[in-house]
Amino acid sequence: MLMLSSKPKHCTSTQLEVIDDLHREEIEILNDFMRALPNSDDDQIVEWLQRLEGQVLNHFNEEEACMKRVMCPNFKKHVEAHSETLKAIKEAKKNWEEERDLLQLWNFLEYDYMAWFEHHVRDFDIPAAEFIRRYEEAE
């Protein structure tokens, strides 16, 4: 039996409620998934992956709509970062379906995805949220 444990994940605030809410929902799903993962069967893991992928897609679509509405700088680069991450999630899902390697999936979620998430919030979402806030205050 593989022993896996994870500290609950948190996210840095962007100071923009709509984006922070999307991040909180995603982190909540990720935390629940990480807690459930060691005791889940294959079908449950596929369901969790689909749930995470759906939330990430919703998060990205909502965030991009906010950015597009205010013609946020670096929009294209931000969308490209989202696309790369969706691709990585789909790849992790495909790897799980083909190999059923729990440790590989765990490492993707615990390290790869969370490192990306933290970097993305810091380098992309916080500046975008600041631009959106300033735009809305000026309206």
Image: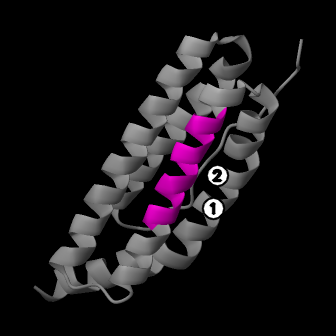
Which quarter shows the C terminus? bottom left
Q: Which residue is mark 1?
A: 116
Counting from the top left corner in percent of width and height, residue 62 is at: 26, 57
Magenta stretch, residue numbers? 82-95
Counting from the top left corner in percent of width and height, residue 118 is at: 62, 62
Q: Nearer the viewer, residue 45 or 100?
A: 100
Q: CA distance from mark 2 to mark 1?
A: 5 Å
Magenta stretch: residue 86 in it? yes
The reply to whether callout 2 and callout 1 are in contact (CB within 8 Å) is yes
Residue at image location 49% in from the left, 70% down from the top: 81
Q: Amino acid at mark 1?
A: Trp
Within 10 Å of disc 1 (Cα), the crowding (few <14, some 14-19, many 20+) is: few
The residue tagged with tag 1: helix, strand or loop?
Answer: helix
Q: Using the rendered image of the protein, determine whether residue 100 is visible from the camera's viewpoint.
A: yes
Counting from the top left corner in percent of width and height, residue 47 is at: 48, 21
The residue tagged with tag 2: helix, strand or loop?
Answer: helix
Q: Quadrant of residue 34?
A: top right
Q: How many marks?
A: 2
Q: Which residue is mark 2?
A: 113
Q: Main secondary structure of the magenta part?
A: helix
Q: Amino acid at mark 2?
A: Tyr
Relative to 29, residue 63 above or below: below
Which quarter shows the N terminus? top right
Within 10 Å of disc 2 (Cα), the crowding (few <14, some 14-19, many 20+) is: some
